[in-house]
Image (cartoon, coloured by chain):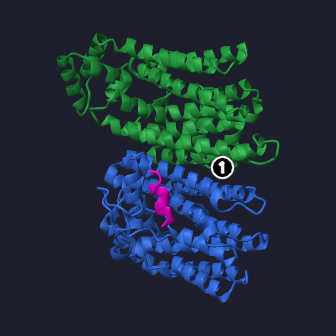
Chain colours: A blue, B green
């Protein structure tokens, strides 16, 4: 795969850090032995390539853009895992858990710069327009950089919220529209930009990306609480233990009875949550039907994104592809 | 100053993280109150602007390139401080020491992306060439990204070396040519690229940057051991305590008598160094004349960089400016 080639091209530097990155992508084990482990879902590249092709551009033209998106996504994961003390991803120990936070921090930085280089390169190979100038490449670069900034701003807000009790649902939606939404929106937007010159179509794909970003993150929030260890690699209730103020929890706090609300607030003010606390929180969330609420919301956003794309008048085949992608993102079980 | 404007333009996002950056640059205190504290020396921008002007370009043309360099430098400082547990910079608590490592990590990431945006912008404003195409801008971007990658690779090597006993002087020089050298070399190279089209002159400035990078880091190593707290903000011997394998220490290990060498190796194998150990190391370094050796080496590299620039046949005034800059970098006392 093209992404593997991108990372491999740096390995000549013969630094262990590139071995860390190959481990991160699931291509090698900790000792540098080739494996065929569970890798990431590659959703952002899939969205980008879909958009470029569905709008008449070629799949190949968008491939370096797609790689850049996946590299940026993984850069953010590596740093997020350090910040959140996440010890596992896809059932494997995270980078910092294996090599320590110092080296993992640097590995994330390297990946960001490799993403920058990949963005530079894709101008050269694929998105030069007919006049041989780089206006389109400059636009793509701008879009990616802006998405990256929003993503990091969102990560900052997320860290801040974990220590706050009073987070409004609006504040939360604003945060996820940055932290997760920015890169998903950018994936469709970027692919569209490469696939067509019609500003109306580009806008439609961007809006679809915004809706899909919400759907995806809300589903992620659901899995963070009710996902089983087998499917997500994390124990049930793990987001509760981390006092993460995700959609189901915010909904529960907002719609619980006065008494239950007090209980929830008391629990989330504790330094550390015990198993018993998690059971209590889950039971209150049951009363407030927060799972139903969240699943309906994810479904609504997913439908909204499909409606947007529907208005782009794609071929039936493309439309079916998008529905499949969108439903996977917003309704998946892992 | 232009850099302040760059950071300020993001502050509308009204996120505390931009307050962290203003603190980092010494413009605000922890509470966001304007201060006129000790700020960075701005050496990299100074080198870049010098090169552009000395080679006939205008100072203004290089200003966004200069800002990008300083932003990248500060991004690396923020992450380095987390990795090295440095609690002070310029006599002020570092970002992670005030806000915690999680937020500091994100602040560093944001700064990197602001640097990326600044690199994108400088094409728009300043380095478009007469045919109104962006070839020069693309070259500048490539140079900066490559320097950034080398810098981070160097940081990785540096972390690795702290845990190793047998680091050769060659290995060390290779590491600093990346960690510190890459950005200093890039500063002169970038300024030259903006100032002239003569590949010979650009090469001369690049080579001067390579030499100057060594001179600068070796002086930094000297100050890390013998610099007084008043001038550097760090206690005498602080790099010994951190078991940093810097030039004076490597020289001492390599040239000490068999007995002293054993003592040094034993000390550097300890988990934690006591004050007494530091005194012992300082005394052996005295015997091996490692301060003399290091100062001579720094001076030699400084002279080498001056010789390079001399061959560019600049005006007397420009030559004097460079000598002043180079001597400040390689012979400074803080």
Q: Chain of mark 1?
A: B
- Residues rendered magenta in the picture: A1-10
- Depth check: give the residue in front, B224 or A314: A314
**Residue A76 x, y percent position in the rendering:** 50, 57
- Tell how many labels: 1
Q: Residue at 75% of width from left, 58% of height from top?
A: A132
The quadrant the N terminus of chain B occupies is top right
Q: Is residue A54 above or below residue B309?
A: below
- Using the image as rendered, state which of residue B18 and residue A88 is in the foreground: A88
B45 sits left or right of A202 in the view: left
x and y percent of residue B270 in the render? 22, 31
Identify the residue under disc 1. Answer: B14
Residue A194 visible to the viewer: yes
Q: Is residue A34 left or right of residue B43?
A: left
Tell me where residue A78 appears, x and y as whole percent.
44, 56
Image: B322 above or below B117 = above
Q: Is residue B192 left or right of residue B209?
A: right
Residue B310 on the magenta segment: no
Residue at point 73%, 32% (across, down)? B196
Camera-side residue of A72 and B196 = B196
């Amino acid at each position: 795969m093209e992404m593997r080639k991108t990372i491999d091209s740096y390995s000549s530097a013969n630094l262990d850090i590139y071995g860390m990155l190959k481990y991160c992508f699931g291509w090698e084990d900790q000792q540098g032995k080739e494996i065929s482990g569970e890798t990431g879902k590659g959703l952002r590249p899939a969205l980008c390539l879909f958009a470029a092709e569905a709008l008449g551009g070629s799949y190949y033209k968008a491939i370096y853009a797609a790689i850049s998106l996946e590299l940026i996504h993984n850069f953010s994961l590596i740093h997020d895992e350090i910040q959140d003390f996440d010890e596992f991803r896809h059932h494997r120990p995270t980078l910092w858990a294996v090599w320590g936070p110092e080296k993992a921090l640097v590995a994330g930085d390297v990946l960001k710069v490799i993403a920058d280089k990949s963005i530079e390169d894709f101008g050269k190979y694929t998105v030069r327009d007919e006049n041989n100038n780089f206006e389109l490449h400059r636009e793509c670069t701008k879009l990616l950089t802006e998405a990256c900034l929003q993503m990091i701003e969102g990560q900052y807000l997320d860290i801040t919220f974990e220590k706050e009790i009073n987070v409004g649902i609006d504040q939360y939606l604003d945060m996820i529209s940055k932290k997760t939404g920015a890169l998903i929106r950018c994936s469709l937007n970027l692919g569209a930009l490469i696939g067509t010159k019609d500003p109306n179509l580009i806008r439609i794909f961007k809006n679809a990306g915004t809706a899909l970003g919400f759907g995806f993150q809300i589903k992620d929030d659901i899995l963070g609480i009710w996902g089983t260890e087998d499917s997500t690699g994390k124990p049930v209730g793990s987001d509760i233990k981390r006092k993460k103020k995700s959609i189901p929890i915010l909904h529960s706090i907002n719609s619980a009875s006065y008494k239950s609300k007090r209980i929830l607030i008391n629990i989330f003010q504790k330094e550390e949550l015990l198993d018993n606390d998690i059971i209590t929180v889950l039971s209150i969330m049951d009363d407030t039907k927060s799972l139903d609420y969240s699943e309906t919301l994810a479904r609504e956003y997913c439908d909204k994104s499909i409606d947007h794309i529907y208005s782009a008048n794609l071929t039936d085949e493309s439309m079916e592809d998008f529905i499949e992608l969108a439903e996977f993102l917003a309704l998946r079980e892992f």
